[in-house]
Image (cartoon, rainbow, N blue to C red):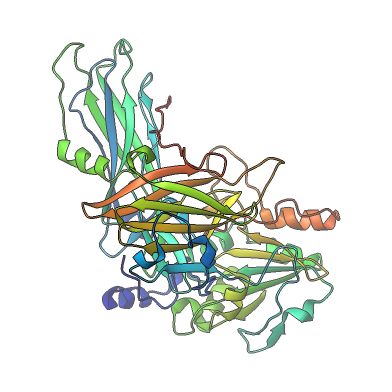
Amino acid sequence: MPALLLLAATALPAQILPDDRGDRLVKVELLADRAAIRPGESFSLGVRLRIEPKWHIYWEHHGDSGIPTRAELESPPGFEVGPPRFPGPERDVAEGDIVSYIHHGEIVLVLDAKAPDPIPPGLERASFAVDASWLVCTEACFAGSGHAELELPIAAAGSAPAPANAKLFTEARARLPKPWAELRGATIEWRGDARAPIAVFTVPGASDLELFPLASESTTLVGRAIEPMKSACRLAATLRFKSSAPGDAPRLEGVLRVRQEQGEAFYRLDTSPNRPADPAGSNPTPKGS
Amino acid sequence: MKRASRVFAHPFGGLWVAGAAFALFSVPAWALQDAGQEKKEDKKEEVKKEEKAVKAEIGKPAPPFELKDVDGKTVKLADSKGKTVVIEWFNPSCPFCVQAYSEGGALKKLPEELKAKGIVWLSVVSEKPQNPGGKVENIKTFMEKNGLAVSMLLDPDGKVGKTYGAKTTPHMFVIDAKGTLVYQGALDNAPFGKVEGDGERIGYVEAALADLEAKRKVERAETKSYG
């Protein structure tokens, strides 16, 4: 941690920390991958969060401490907008081995959207707005929120597509977790017993793995061991499972970070002992907003 | 990412957490042995492993402790034998605690109301004394400003925090009159007083205490704490 920030922070008694500090430490912007929207067109919205250097916010599951970052979108009638998709997070281990899942720098939450066809009569411009909230931390933490708006003209049906922010969206999509099926040769094996199951992930060609579980009331991550080998890497996730109904089975949802020669990528997983080899990995389905 | 050099996770921020709720040890060796197609001799690096080791368990006797309060008085958990006890992990710099103790916040009146019912309320600060959140002066200022009249215990080395697996501030624990840990987790479902979606606030501590009062098993014995 930078000494300057620590000094700055320690100089302020907690009681007088300004309330809007959390708002100012993260900048929110709403963007689209189109300059104009045609009837029936699928497009993407992006919530860009720019975090002050040295500070972090939290992933959609915060881990041991923190609270999840949220983004709620308002869209015009008839437009379908899916949930925000988060890029793969970083793992932060604080003193006391408190494990949190965080984001530094700049992230873009991607939302898949679809325009109605036909566009409702009289709608010449589509207005979108996002309300985002977060907890932003370094040594200190502040709750923050921000609002951003975006207005896009409606283009005529049959007009030429009007792409925008292509580089930003290409990079943002590359950071999103991919479907599990794209992780070739990877296996998941369930071991242990019902209360203390262990999920073992083996990924050929990987040099390192990391697991980022989503929040679950029944299945929680207790610990994990990573074993890099010559031609693969293994990760054993020790879990705790609390059954709430007869026939319940552990279920581990989350993201696996895979480091390979060609770089790092994240893969969505949703696995249980009943279907270890068939973890779901499809994109979230856009739903009405 | 690079490990942060901070002493305690978030000394000011609320995301404190002095306690090692984890210890670096033992995912069972068999979890990895023979788990895949690789042979053991292929292994080229030490296994990175960690597993939580917390002594406080729901349904088991609450681990005993003895701490000094902000006035230097020794307080033992055993002093409350035969009484229901609520333990709150607290940090005067934590934004969640600040909100909870502010006017209209979930903790503004709760400790007093529970004390009136004969329930013991212990607040614990697991923070190094050199950090603002662990400074007695700051803690006392907070207590005076917010009219907080509770046993405010100091856990400067985080030992009790580690034992209980306290990870956030607030992180709540309820111990029944027999000394059994019956609840651990969040104060409620409303960080900063806001419930996500359209739901109503559920005070998990109050719910656990209501179950105890009605001589029922605590229905929601564990939740995920926030902070």
Q: Position of residue A153 (x, y in %)?
A: 21, 22
What residue is drawn where x is 53% and y is 53%? B191
B113 left or right of A94? right
Q: Is A110 above or below relative to A154?
A: below
What residue is drawn where x is 62% and y is 46%? B201
B7 and A174: which is toward the camera: A174
Is residue B27 visible in the rendered structure shown here? no
Q: Is B72 above or below relative to B48?
A: below
Image quarter (top left, top right, bottom left or bottom right) of the N terminus of chain B: bottom left
Q: Position of residue A229 (x, y in %)?
A: 34, 62
Residue B154 in which image quadrant: bottom right
Q: Position of residue A102 (x, y in %)?
A: 37, 57
A220 and B34: which is toward the camera: B34
A101 and A74: which is toward the camera: A101
Residue B78 in which image quadrant: bottom right
B95 and A91: which is toward the camera: A91
Marker count (numbered) = 0
What residue is drawn where x is 40% and y is 57%? A234
Q: Position of residue A30 (x, y in %)?
A: 27, 38
Q: Is B189 above or below relative to A141?
A: above
Is residue A99 visible in the rendered structure shown here? yes
